[in-house]
Image (tube, coloured by chain):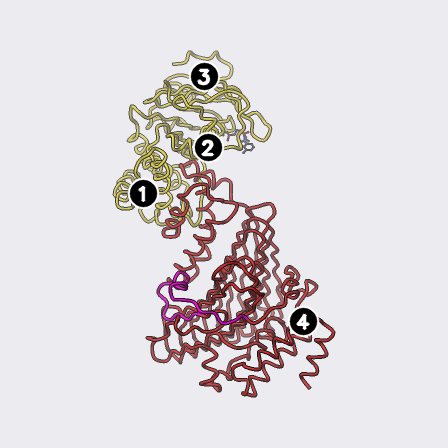
Amino acid sequence: MSLLEIKNLHVTVGGNEILKGIDLTVNAGEVHSIMGPNGSGKSTLAQVLARRDAYHVTEGSILFEGKDLLEMKPEEAACEGLFLAFQYPVEIPGIGNTYFLRSALNAQRKYRGEEEMDAMDFLPMFKEKLKLLEMDDKLMNRSLNEGFSGGEKKRNEILQMAVLEPKLAILDETDSGLDIDALRIVAEGVNSLRSPGRAMVVVTHYQRLLNYIVPDFVHVLVDGRIVRSGGKELALELEERGYSWTEHEPVGARA
Amino acid sequence: MRETAVATVADTNTGLESWLENFTEFTKTAVGQKLPWLKRLREDAFERFCEVGFPTTRDEDWRFTNVSAIARTSFRAAGAAELTAEEVAPYGAAGAAADLVFVNGRFARELSRVDGLPKGVTVASLRERIESHPAEVETHLGRYADTQRDPFVALNTAFIGDGAYVHMARGVVVDAPIYLLYLSTKEDTATMTHPRNLIVAEDESQVAVIEDYASVGGECIAFSNAVTELIAGESTVAQHYLIEREHLKAFNVSTLRIQQGRSANVASHSLLLGGGLVRNNVHPVLAGDGGECLINGLFLGTGRQHLDNYMHVEHAAPHCGSRQFYNGILDGHSHGVFHGRIVVHKIAQKTDAKQTNRNLLLSDDAQIDTKPQLEIYADDVKCTHGATIGQIEENALFYLQSRGISEVEARKLLLMAFAEECVERMQSNVARAHAQRLIGEHLLFTEGIAPQSGNLGRIVERVVEEVG
Ligand SMILES: Nc1ncnc2c1ncn2[C@@H]1O[C@H](COP(=O)(O)OP(=O)(O)O)[C@@H](O)[C@H]1O
Ligand SMILES: [Mg+2]
């Protein structure tokens, strides 16, 4: 059974059809990259997977470990092991980072029938992950993402991912706006989580990130459709030639 | 002659008859009625009340709040009631410097703890202080609370009987707050109390006082009409906390009148959780140069609660600053009001006055009226005001849920965070912890985030402990 199986997915937002029949299968252990021009529907796909209800699925199906993802609320999808690193992480004044993350972890553990973690157990593990992402603990005493720089917000997303250890991580342009050092740190964080049991879908606008996170498959999303799929070399080709050719030349075989 | 005037008005206004009866009855046994100044203070106030009666919504100051339910009701003075220490224990705030308990408006000595205070601090029941030190009380009582302008203040003044008396000698500092608990018990008839508090902080002293209004036993029609005069001398640091958490049939009108001297730093914090019809008047007068006043509040309405906050900030001296921050969360059919009046007198140059009112509406039927009212007679001043009305932010909610936190918990977290903005401004740890506990318990019962699992209580406790 595949970890994620998307079939003929059509999605409308505010009355406009944004996704026009997406098929995508992701198996455990794989890293997929979705590339595409601005406005092609990459974030829409990511948000639908995370179960945002403003995005209306009109046709098609999504199975997550064989379960109907479309029946799940966002928190259920999360507890089942799906994680979205947001393109635009939200600032939430008044909710502390550390407290929030421990609450989230415990909500997930409870869902899975595991013991909740108290602060004593949580903190050492958390400190490790902070180190991995070279993040200042002081940030963690602040409110969620409040006053964080763009790069700090993106790193915080990966930190959350590292703590929550999802089965499927969707990274929505986690690389955008990062300088090269931050990019390297984020990529290392992501790579440290690669494992045979875990899959990733890396949404990006640029090939750059893929130098660090080497994908098994690359898909090109244009105007709500996957117009081409291939191996990692497809990313390089896109970098050289841009996106427009993909719409006109015949679609290569699915790798 | 005074009595004749009263009788005349009473004849033409049937509602006032019962007030006249109450007043006559009250003055037969009232404390200090033999003191000419006190007798006169009461009589003048009662006469004023009879002249004007209760306000109506035609009155600009009462536009959003209809008090006809109070005006229609015949109240009787609440009778004496005995409560045991066990019955009272759950209400307290841990860590106060002194605890004064008032049951149905009367000081309950056996439930109170006023010993062990530093030298120079006097904490007593007002009734006792009037008896033992009338001249000291006379110096301040009724000097500031305006019976002319507000009929409720007039009514309270007419019925001055008991309350708290706090006096801080020059330079004396008490860190922990003095905690005043006003309990009303369940009665068969509609009852009223008129708590009257006098807090005098002499120059360079520091004091914090918590007034906490709560009900014991089942719902009944009860009217608390409190007035507190807080006189903050030069370079004092004073904090006042009002907590209203009576049951939903209670009427609660309270007036805090602050008189600030030069360089005094005063804070008023209000937390409105309970009460059916609540009016919270905060009236600081910055009367000395360089005074600072923080006016901070949070009101959480549900069901059919009506919670009205009437701020009247008077800048009467130069170089003073006032900051108002009120947050409202309104659910069900509740109605919130924030009226922020700022008066800058001609002399008050270099005034810096700020006002912010933020509101969250959790249901379509909830309502908020927010109204700034700036009257500026000086030319070199900075006054800013802003109000927002919104819902729980969908983006934030989704973000929390996307990490595995249930919708109910996520809403609760966001509400706690919104409330926390106000709680964080409370300087006293004791008051803050008390407020957090009460807010946590309260949110548990708010309709729009109705508990769906038995774990919610625990979650709230955690939130209370750790948010922020
Ligand atoms: N919440 C929304 N409401 C209306 N239109 C939206 C919304 N989100 C996305 N869209 C539209 O859907 C299209 C795809 O957007 P998006 O998925 O963000 O693209 P990408 O992430 O590939 O840049 C765009 O035309 C965008 O304007
Ligand atoms: Mg996008």
Q: Give me the C-alpha separation between circle 1 and circle 4.
A: 64 Å
Q: Name the residue under label 4.
A: B53
Q: Mark 1 points at which residue?
A: A135
Q: Nearer the viewer, residue A254 or A98?
A: A98
Q: Vertically, is A15 above or below B26?
A: above
Is any part of residue B406 visible from this angle? yes
Are the residues flagged by discs 2 and 3 in contact, CB closer than 8 Å?
no
Q: Nearer the viewer, residue B468 or A106?
A: A106
Element at label 4: loop
| Chain that appears yellow | A
- Residue B97 falls within the magenta-colored stretch: yes
Mark with earlier residue (2, 3): 2
Element at label 3: strand
Q: Which amino acid does label 2 sit on?
A: Lys
Label 2: chain letter: A
Q: Give me the C-alpha separation between circle 2 and circle 3.
A: 31 Å
Q: Nearer the viewer, residue B339 or A36?
A: B339
Label 3: chain letter: A
